[in-house]
């Protein structure tokens, strides 16, 4: 699926507080987080989406090939799926994230 976000959905963008991928809230609800779904289980869970993602983020990085990108290595995104990532995500970390694998921080 494409990571293009139409301008009409820019207000609904959210960033995952674990991996910092930026997606519309509806996509988190429908598919979950492409990097963290195995332990966050966001798909179909509005409460988990509210606790594990944030609408407050700064800067955007677009990664087409994270494995060969120096920016991805610098930001520690090189093991994630291609997509759009926030440079900085602001929010209160949920207790749900306390069980996230340490290599994701």
Image (cartoon, rainbow, N blue to C red):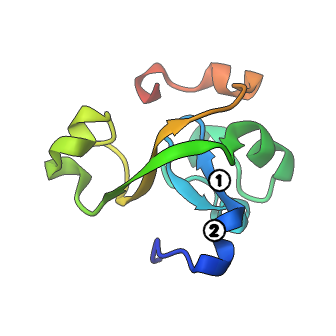
Tell me how many marks there are: 2
Taking the image as shown, residue 65 lies to the left or right of residue 39, namely left
* Viewer-closest of 43 and 94: 94
Q: Position of residue 7 (x, y in %)?
A: 59, 78
Alpha carbons under labels 2 and 1: distance apart: 9 Å
Question: Compared with residue 62, is residue 71 higher up or lower down, i.e. above or below?
Answer: above
Closer to us: mark 2 or mark 1?
2
Which disc number belongs to residue 10?
2
SS at mark 2 in the image: helix
In the depicted structure, whether residue 74 falls above or below residue 2: above
Name the spot of residue 62 as percent of width and height, x first.
34, 59
Q: Which residue is mark 1?
A: 14
Residue 2 vs residue 6, the one in the foreground: 6
Q: Residues within 10 Å of mark 1 (few under 14, many from 20)?
A: many
For the point 22% across and 37% down, the residue is 73
Q: Quadrant of residue 23?
A: bottom right
């Amino acid at each position: 699926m494409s990571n293009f976000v139409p301008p009409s959905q820019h207000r609904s963008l959210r960033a995952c507080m674990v991996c910092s991928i930026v997606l519309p809230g509806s996509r988190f609800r429908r598919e979950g987080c492409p990097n963290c779904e195995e332990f966050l289980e966001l798909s179909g869970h509005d409460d988990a989406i509210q606790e594990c993602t944030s609408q407050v983020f700064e800067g955007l990085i677009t990664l087409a090939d994270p494995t060969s990108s120096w920016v991805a290595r610098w930001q520690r995104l090189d093991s994630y799926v291609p997509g759009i990532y926030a440079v900085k995500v602001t929010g209160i970390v949920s207790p749900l994230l306390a069980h996230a694998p340490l290599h994701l921080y």
